[in-house]
Structure formats: structure tokens, C-alpha cells
Amino acid sequence: MDTPTELGEFLRTRRARLLPEDVGLVSYGARRRVPGLRREELAQLAGVSAAYYTRLEQGQSSNASEAVLDALARALRLSDDEHAHLRNLARPSRAKRRPPERPECVRPATKQLIAAMDGVPVLVMDRRSDVLAWNAMGHALVAGHLDPNAPDRPADRPNLQRMLFLDPHTRELYPDWEEEARRAVSSLRLVAGRHADDRRLAELIGELLMKSADFATLWSRHPVRNCISGVKSLHHPVVGAMELDFETLRVADESGHWMLLFSAGPSSPGEAGLRLLREVVGRERTPAPLNSPVHAG
């Protein structure tokens, strides 16, 4: 990823969403060629020279101090997530010589743990949203149309971002697909800012930009939000409509893997839906009796 270009685009989108009157500047009604604040106005608010800010936005300055970045974040009224993203883009870590990448894998103990959580849908993913493992409930909830063993094969691993934008079955799973898409792109923006030298991540983003106009539109707006918990509305093809709470948990090692878990409140429709899904999964995993029609000759 071209980090200086990303920085400039991010700053421009944040300038464009603010009007002079929003930040206490006097506008005398002169016709403005672009929406939002001008570079000169933002520089004035942040206490830096217009020339310096212009160089920063054009990717010609890579040594912005913490004080300058903090001042820009205040002037642009950035959220905490956006402020962190600004730092990542303005001061990217130096690329290190990387050994040849090996397929990522989940520790056996982690697989054992999520398998034991048979009433809770769980997925384990890497930072690119490749699914490295899921338990039976996790598979049935978000990808019942896919091979349950696909995460075990690196070449076939599902990717939640790719599924959301390119797989029609996944699109039908979310009644408010636009909100789910905004949430996904907002999280991916943060990850891309932290790992600008990740070739496979850049390839995923490039693929989605080429194949999905919806993704390209959302990506160009530079949304940034760390979506670690919340509520997802789903319309499951077997169970029907459900509202489920989701949480993300980091695996406590150096892998960078994380878990996505779903739950529902006591006596809620979502709890009833998960209970029904568990029954469906149980029936599918129970071998048919030897005298049943399945084994009849």
C-alpha cells in the first residue's frame, strides 16, 4: 500500500466533512471551490504553516511530530480510532525483511477450546479476516453453504471480507447489508493502516476494489472504526431472523489471531434461534442408525 497517498486521501476526506462554521471560523459567503475546510484553514486551526500542512497532505513529509498529529486530530475532530489511524499513516513502521510466508495455523488447543463451546458460534481469524478455524455452530451460522473443512486448507480458506462483498449467500445473510459492509470496511481500514507492508492484505484489498463497486465506494470514503463488539442482525436460511451480540477476543500469543463469538440475551428471540441452530447442527452430526434408509441397500 502507498502509505503517503493513503495519508493524503484520509486527511482530505476529513477536511471535506467540516465546514468553517463547524470549527468557529468566519465564512464571508465567498464561493468555495471544494467542500469542507481549505488547507489553509486547517493549518490555522492546528497551529502549523499552510506550506508544511500541504507537504504532509501530499506525502512529502514523513517526520510529523506527535504534537502536530495531535493538533491535526483535534482540529479535524477525529475519533480515537481515527486519531490512531492518522498516526499509523503518518509514521508507518519501517518495512522489515520478512522470511517467506508460511500458511497460518491455529494451535490445537485453540481448536479444542472452540469445539468444546458447542452452544456458541465461534470463528478464529487472522488479521486479514481469513477464517483459520470455526466450530460447528460458527460454520452453520455464517457459512453453512461452504465446506466445513475449508479452513484446514490454506488455499481454500474463506475470508469474511471477500464473502461479504463477493458471495451472494453471505449478502443475503444480513438484512442491513449496507451497515455490515460499512462496519467491515471501517475495521479493514484500521488493519491496513497498522500493516501497510502486508502484501497479502494489499492483494485482498486490490481484489475487492476491482471486483466490488460497493467496496470501492466505501473504501474511497476512508471510514475508520474499531468494531470489537456490537449487535448483528441476521436472516439465517434455516433458523430465520435473529439479532445476536458479537464480541471479538485476541488470542493471547504473538500470532495476531482473534476470535469472533456470538451470543444472545436470556429468553430473547436470538437465544431461541441459537438453540434451534444447535439442534440442527446436532441432527446433522449424528450418524444415522444402521437400519435407517440411509444405510439400507
Image: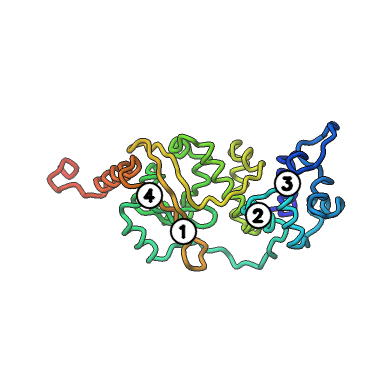
Amino acid residing under circle 4: Ser
Secondary structure under the numbered disc 2 in the rendered image: helix
In this picture, is 67 found above or below 273?
below
Provide residue 197's location: percent of width, then percent of height.
Answer: 65, 59
User: Mark 4 or mark 3: which comes first in sequence?
Assistant: 3
Q: Classify mark 3: residues with Cα within 10 Å, few (<14), some (14-19) or many (20+).
A: some
Secondary structure under the numbered disc 1 in the rendered image: strand
> What is the quadrant of residue 183 in the picture?
top right
Label ID, residue 263: 4
- 255 or 49: which is nearer to us? 49
Q: CA distance from mark 3 to mark 2?
A: 12 Å
User: Mark 4 or mark 1: which comes first in sequence?
Assistant: 1
User: Mark 2 or mark 1: which comes first in sequence?
Assistant: 2
Amino acid residing under circle 3: Glu
Which residue is depicted at the point 41% across and 51% down? 150
Provide residue 106's location: percent of width, then percent of height.
Answer: 44, 62
Secondary structure under the numbered disc 4 in the rendered image: strand
Find disc 1 in the rendering and name its residue. Answer: 249
